[in-house]
Amino acid sequence: DKGWGCAYRSLQTLVSWFRRQQYTARQPPSHREVQDILVSLGDKERAFAGSKQWVGAIELSYVLDEVLGVQCKVLTVSRGADLPSRAREIAHHFDTQGTPIMVGGGVLAYTLLGIHYNPSTGDAAFLILDPHYTGADDLKRIQQGQWVAWKQAGDKAAAGGDLFVKDAF
């Protein structure tokens, strides 16, 4: 799924979190299962199943509702540079809900695992799990490669380029 599966992997991380917290015994859905669910819900045409087409936050919310009965809130920002302006809301989410958050738009998705937010200054750092990693299950390599790391606005993604694209999302 290299080049098209990052949001699917983010969804799998979210479902894994619910499983690890013992809210469900359900295994994370496969990419094909996600596609089949979206087709069965009428969100996608039949040809979508088995394709390499992307999904986004809205589709993930449909699947989470279908497989876990979990309702989602979608926060909209028009460009990556605006994400830190939502840090207070994101911090509140982690304080009250705790679940990872899928962040995505355009061609990229990431999974937020936590936030360090300073309400006095508004500074924020995000604990990012970057689902673009496609190597071996080598924790040391993943951590050294910044695939799971604290990031701030303006930092680079593990694969290079801007983490949050300033003028797009």
Image: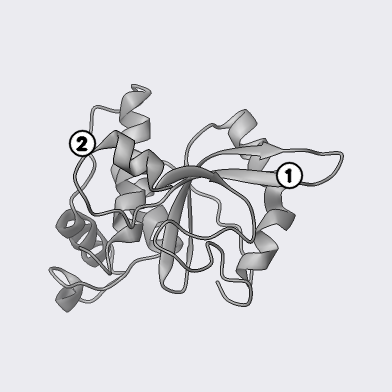
Q: Is residue 161 left or right of residue 52?
A: right
Near mark 1 (Cα within 10 A), the count class, few <14, some 14-19 or many ≥20, is some
Q: Is residue 125 left or right of residue 2?
A: right
Q: Is residue 69 visible?
A: no
Residue 88: numbered disc: 1
Work out whether 19 lies above or below 51. above
- What residue does disc 2 label? 27
Badge 1 or badge 2: first in the primary sequence? 2
- Expressed as whole percent of the image width and height from the top left, the position of residue 128 reads 49, 46
Q: Is residue 45 visible?
A: yes
Q: Quadrant of the C terminus?
A: bottom right
Q: Residue at x 33, y 58 (%)?
A: 132
Three-letter amino acid code at the position of disc 2: Gln
Quarter assignment of residue 26: top left
Q: Residue at x 44, y 55 (%)?
A: 110
- Expressed as whole percent of the image width and height from the top left, the position of residue 95 reads 64, 30
SS for dot 1: helix
Quarter assignment of residue 35: bottom left
